[in-house]
Image: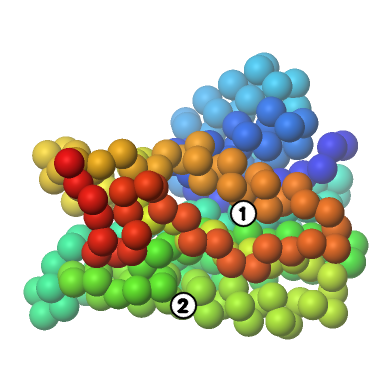
Amino acid sequence: MNKIVFITGATSGIGKACAEKFAAANYDLVITGRRMDRLDELQIYLQQKYNVQVKTCCFDVQKREAVFNSVNNLPAAWKNIDILINNAGLALGKDSFENADLDDWDTMLHTNVDGLLYVSKALLPFMIENKKGHIINIGSIAGKEVYENGNIYCASKFAVDAITKSMRIDLLKHRIKVTGINPGAVETEFSLVRFKGDEKKSNAAYDGYVPLTGADIADTIFYCASLPEHVCINDVVITCLQQAGTYYFNKE
């Protein structure tokens, strides 16, 4: 087999862009997500266009048992994971702390934090056995600076930042790279999910400036993953030209 990349949340946005980027570079892929129809569609597309092998795993990263069952049931050849891209994540709601929905908080924490931990823990034994690997965690600029009404989404991404840094230290002895990718505004399904399907609010989030795309982030991830064995980029913050922080935008 070719080198293998395992991507969570691969059915849209950054995850889908990463799947195409790595497939184009002749990687075999394990793509995961909650929507089997989208996984099947993406699998067929990637295999036909790039002539690579693609394995699908349908599970919700929030569900610990489902994560470990899916990973442990991979055929032996598919367990030689070279790169893990912990992409699955979301924001729900943009309410002030006192008005926020507790279910939204739970979903964000379970997905953005627990999900990343479960998938990493499930795959790590394979990387440790091989004495190599690269874990790439998708954080956010919201994990570097808090902003009004960001509360628990920010908290979840601050947690990802801390986890990424501690993983890098703890896994040094196993020769495993760990990289944190922290995007600013990226036009994907992110805002549509955050505003719970309200297209007007979702579209307004990108008014007046040109945001990043999923492909922009995939390019950055691929660069980090393609460096020589002795080089590890630990942390990247990437924004569009018209953004310089969670609050600072130059909107036209």
Q: Is residue 106 visible?
A: no
* Residue 129 place in picture, x, y as percent: 89, 67
Q: Is residue 162 above or below residue 51?
A: below
Q: Residue at x 50, y 72 (%)?
A: 160
Q: Kindly report the distance in space between the C-alpha atoms of the residues bearing marks 1 and 2.
A: 17 Å
Confirm whether residue 12 shows in the render.
Answer: yes
The residue under the point 71% across, 51% down is: 225
Secondary structure under the numbered disc 1 in the rendered image: strand
Q: Residue furthest top?
A: 48
Q: Is residue 77 above or below residue 71?
A: above
Q: Earlier in the sequence, mark 1 or mark 2?
A: 1
Residue 230 sits in quarter: bottom right
- The x and y percentages for residue 15 are 52, 44
Amino acid tagged 1: Ile
Q: Is residue 186 above or below residue 178?
A: above
Q: Nearer the viewer, residue 171 or 230?
A: 230
In front of the other: 117 or 234: 234
Q: Nearer the viewer, residue 29 or 171?
A: 171
Q: Which mark is residue 85?
A: 1
The outermost residue toward the right is: 130
Q: Quadrant of the C terminus?
A: top left
Whole-percent x, y for residue 45 in the image: 59, 21
Identify the residue at horizontal 47%, vertical 31% (top origin).
Answer: 37
- The residue wearing badge 2 is 159
| Picture quarter with the N terminus | top right
